[in-house]
Amino acid sequence: MKVKIFLEKENSQKILEVPKNQTIEYVLKKLKINPQTVIVVKNGEVVTEQETIREKDELKILSVKLGG
Amino acid sequence: MTDLRYERQIMIFGKSGQAKLARARIAIIGCGGLGSMASQYLAMSGIGFLRLIDSDKVEDSNLNRQFFSVKDLGKPKSLCLKDRLLSLNPDVKMEAIKEKLSEKNCRELIRDCDIILDCLDNLQTRLVLSDACKSLGKPLVHGSIHGLSGQQITLLPGSGYLRKILGGKKQPAGKIPVLGPAPGFIGSLQALEAIKLITGFGKPNTRLLIFDGESNRAEFVKV
């Protein structure tokens, strides 16, 4: 299945082919992104890496911001 | 308190709202880019009490974004900020604490405050603060920045607090890049959130605001 992914760091959108019942963790691994450095938003909600992805889900991968 | 000073905001939340501000106690954790901005608007709005907490001293590299002057270089940030805020509004009671927030002192430093502002610059201390706020049932107004971007959320008792957003994340190595208007914007929002909570006017922002000043994108996401 195809999943639409927005990458904040690159300000770009990607379509990724993801096997059924895969998790966010799989996507991050595929994109070579360290999960400790990003916040993942699925369909407008912050989710964990264990969250399963379904057809037509929209992901946003946002950089962790920690400065003050 | 003079009604004339606050007349424009009394138009928004009435004299009763202003009286609530005058009775409120707020802890500002971190007196850098976010804290120096948020605390100014809070002092100017007529907050009753501000506790300013930061263990750092003012450095030259702070002056692109933090409201200190060259005369403050080498002096504790919390004390310099207190002096500056008193010049803006001498009616506000203030306490400057020159300590690093830790698991040991955190609960004592926030226990007698109504609202806590997370204006910190590192993950570990943010989580210590968040856990303490959660266990004491204190509202935590979070803000953080990176470059031209930032995020803000108001975490209320009963929510998952910061661990739900930042649990398991890693502090990036080295200094974080930042341009002054980013903490200026997010720090102002933190002051706005605190004022809304105190007066009861408006709705708190309980979704995570993501603001990207580089590519002009802003959105609120559920947590």
Image: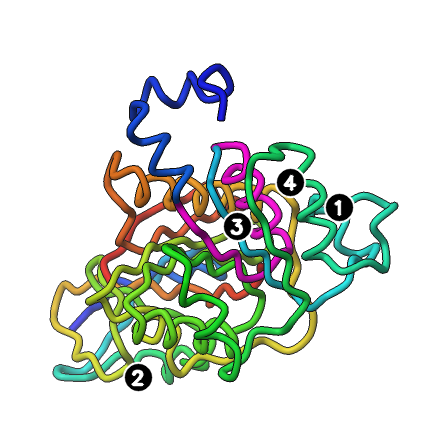
* Alpha carbons under labels 2 and 3: distance apart: 43 Å
Residue, disc 4 = B85
Could you confirm whether marks 2 and 3 are on the same chain? Answer: no
Quadrant position of residue B110 = bottom left
Q: Nearer the viewer, mark 4 or mark 1?
A: 4
* Alpha carbons under labels 1 and 3: distance apart: 18 Å
State whether residue B18 is above or below residue A12: above
Residue B36 is one of the magenta-drawn residues: yes
Residue drawn at (39%, 23%), measured in percent from left and top? B9
The reply to whether the C-beta atoms of the residues labelled 2 and 3 are less than 8 Å apart is no
Where's residue A58, x and y in %?
Answer: 22, 61
Q: Chain of mark 4?
A: B
* Alpha carbons under labels 4 and 3: distance apart: 10 Å
Query: Magenta residues, as a range?
Result: B24-45
Residue, disc 2 = A25
Q: Secondary structure at mark 1?
A: loop
State whether residue A42 is above or below residue B148: below
Residue, disc 1 = B68
- As drawn, is B125 to the left or to the right of A59? right
Residue, disc 3 = B50
